[in-house]
Image (tube, rainbow, N blue to C red):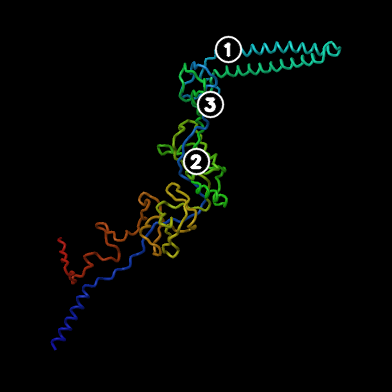
Amino acid sequence: MIAPLRTLALTCAVAVALTACKKPEQQTPPPPEVGVIEAKADTLPLQRELVGRLSPYRSADVRARVPGVLLKRVYQEGQDVKQGQVLFLIDPAPLQAALNASQAELASAQATYANAKAAAARARSLAPKQFVSKSDLDAAEATERTAAAAVQQAQASLANAKINLGYAQVTSPIAGRAGKQQVTEGALVGQSDITLLTTVDQLDPLFVNFSMSSDELTQLRRAQAAGAVSLSGDGKSTVQVKLSDGTMYDQPGTLDYSSAVVDPSTGAVTLRAVLPNPQQILLPGAFVSFQAVLGERKNAFLVPLQALQRDTTGGFVMVVGKDGKVVRKNVVTEGQQGSNWLVSSGIEPGDQVIVAGVQKVKEGSPASAKPWTPTAANGPGAAPAGAAPAAGAAPAAGAPAAAGTAPADAAADPAAKPSDGAPAAEPTKQ
């Protein structure tokens, strides 16, 4: 009789102990609040961040075109010169002597021609009267024609001598900035080759030379052919150069050339833009970064940078659906514009794209959508005001516990015993 009573008492004690150790059931946490923007389709400029190199619009080599001794440089190095302005002087004495000789040869040829012409005229007048033979007439006319040709040859030699004498004054072929003198005074120039004296570069406008991937350019042209991308209002692509201090250059450039051949070593296509440089702030040879507007993308979306995520399958965004659950949508981007991505496909107008709190949600789970604005307190990647703290985050000191959550001291049952091997918590001293 005593054994059954002991068994019953032991069973009741175990039941009481289990009841004391059982923790109160926790309530289901509310869905996390996330900051969202509403996707709106628009026609947006198709921009690319590129790097190019500046080159002069025109560059001319100033060379000695006749042999002689360089006498003087008559321009200031590094200064602007006009087209036709004299830059160097070559000793003209030998060239003047050659000109005088050509003039003498012309005078001799003209005298010979005058005599031959008179003899031929006399023979032609006597031929009808049979005073001269046919052969004598033919010889006189042949001498006349030979003398006339000699006059023309002498005239050509005189013109060439005048041209060579003019080359003694070396002039600038274009207007621009004259460079450093390459040959000093007293040097013999143009003797065996055409000696380089200096260069003149036109600095306004300048060329911006750059390249693009052939695949990217092919996709752009395919999109233009399909009507998804169109040129800007004036029908031209523009570039906006960024200066070294981070400011934008106030003169936009215009794309004027695109190569029809792909460079086999790089797989890129060479392009060129014309950039005004009225104040000559920019100099040839410098590398510049610039923003190229290659057209306008129709039905495109701007999505903040922090909203886009990537994995092995590509880029995607998380969207809060109409049922309040999170949906993943794979997207295609067309480059970056400031603090946004230009998305060409993958989302639809009206989609609630999650910008802040992306790390708190997962696909298929519910979320509470709140409008997101890029303010200082609610910056990139931050949850909107009033959003719930992340899971596992402890409340701030002095702040009340969240609704439905018992304080740590109250959660423990006073009757509960510590687990085996764990020391009992000491009471807090007041």
Q: Nearer the viewer, mark 1 or mark 3?
A: 1
Q: Secondary structure at mark 3?
A: loop
Above or below residue 207? Residue 374 is: below
Q: CA distance from mark 2 to mark 1?
A: 56 Å
Above or below residue 416? Residue 372 is: above
Residue that mark 2 sits on: 239
Q: Residue at x 24, y 71 (%)?
A: 23
Residue 354 quadrant = bottom left
> Given the image, on which type of amino acid does mark 2 rest?
Val
Q: Nearer the viewer, mark 2 or mark 1?
A: 1
> Given the image, on which type of amino acid does mark 1 rest?
Ala
Q: Nearer the viewer, residue 229 or 35?
A: 229
> Is the C-beta separation of discs 1 and 3 under 8 Å?
no
Q: Secondary structure at mark 2?
A: strand
Q: Position of residue 18 (x, y in %)?
A: 21, 75
Q: Secondary structure at mark 1?
A: helix
Residue that mark 1 sits on: 97
Dot 1: few (<14), some (14–19), or many (≥20) neighbours within 10 Å? few
Instruction: Name the quadrant of the C terminus.
Output: bottom left
Q: CA distance from mark 2 to mark 3?
A: 26 Å
Q: CA distance from mark 1 to mark 3?
A: 32 Å
Is 281 left, or right, of 429 in this rendering? right
Q: Earlier in the sequence, mark 2 or mark 1?
A: 1
Q: Nearer the viewer, residue 151 or 229?
A: 151
Residue that mark 3 sits on: 175
